[in-house]
Amino acid sequence: MSNTLLMPKATAVWLVDNTALSFEQIAQFCGLHPLEVKAIADGESAQGIKGMDPIMTGQLTRDEIARAEKDSNHRLKLADPKVRVPESKRKGPRYTPLSKRQDRPNAILWLVRNHPELKDAQIMRLVGTTKTTIAAIRDRTHWNAANLAPMDPVTLGLTSQIELDMEVARANKEKPLPTASGATLLPAAETTRKEAEVAAAAAEEKEKSGDVDVSAVFAKLKQLGGKNEREEDEE
């Protein structure tokens, strides 16, 4: 932890008003220019700033001020703090090494090829990229498209296997499942009607050839028609 002066300008205001220190000594201690300290003394600067006592904050001792007042060449020194507060860690996105940033296009290409069901937003969450980059890689218009090689983002360390599996499962869950033939089943009424048409066509062919049992054909048609009516009633 670096020992730095708190509120330097407010401290300078207090030192100007309450000590006989020179402008140079106050400027050196507070990290200001001597002209700034002179402007404070003349009332031209820091008029709205309330002075802060560095003795009360434990940043200066009375003995140190008295020593500096007697010797204009003495440089004020910060007192050792009685309590050391650890520096807060900066919160923000985790740093990504340059090598991994360069591998992002390869990871995107791998995801596009191996998991086409993933949406752009999901790929962005997995590897931390942009929609523009994803579109360029999909369209092969990326500036380095000729040199890209698909690489597993988990192997590259851009995401975890758990996160990848979760996004894939989510994409598959949202995607509608097609039938095996790509078409839905025909209604029963439509199927029955087609059967009747086929039977009638067959009867017509047999009638033309002179080898047909007309009563059997009409019985079959009547049976199909009755079946259709019963199905409609059930619906």
Image (spheres, rainbow, N blue to C red):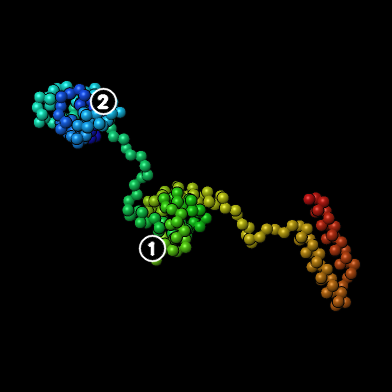
**Who's the residue at 25% across and 31% down the image?**
44
**Who's the residue at 49% across and 56% down the image?**
115
Q: Total label count?
A: 2
Q: Judge whether residue 31 can be spotted in this image.
A: no
Residue 223: x %, y % from top left: 85, 60
Label 1 crowd bin: few (<14), some (14–19), many (20+), radius 10 Å: few
Residue 53: x %, y % from top left: 24, 24
Q: Which mark is residue 144?
A: 1
The quadrant of the picture occupied by the N terminus is: top left
**Who's the residue at 80% across and 66% down the image?**
197
- Label 1 to label 2: alpha-carbon separation: 59 Å
The residue lying toward the viewer, choosing from 51 and 55, is 51
| Outermost residue toward the right in this view | 215
| Outermost residue toward the bottom in this view | 209
Residue 137 lies left or right of residue 180; in this view the side is: left
The amino acid type, in three-letter code, at marker 1 is Asn
Label 2 crowd bin: few (<14), some (14–19), many (20+), radius 10 Å: some
The residue lying toward the viewer, choosing from 11 and 149, is 11
For marks 1 and 2 on the same chain, the one whose residue lies earlier in the sequence: 2
The residue lying toward the viewer, choosing from 65 and 117, is 65
Q: Judge whether residue 14 can be spotted in this image.
A: yes
Residue 214: x %, y % from top left: 89, 69
Identify whether 152 is placed above or below 59: below
Residue 187 lies left or right of residue 22; in this view the side is: right
Do the residues under discs 1 and 2 have CB atoms within 8 angstroms?
A: no
The amino acid type, in three-letter code, at marker 2 is Gly
Quadrant of residue 32 within the rendered picture: top left
The residue lying toward the viewer, choosing from 20 and 81, is 20
Q: Which mark is residue 51?
A: 2
Residue 194 lies left or right of residue 16; in this view the side is: right
**Who's the residue at 12% across and 26% down the image?**
68
Residue 47: x %, y % from top left: 28, 29
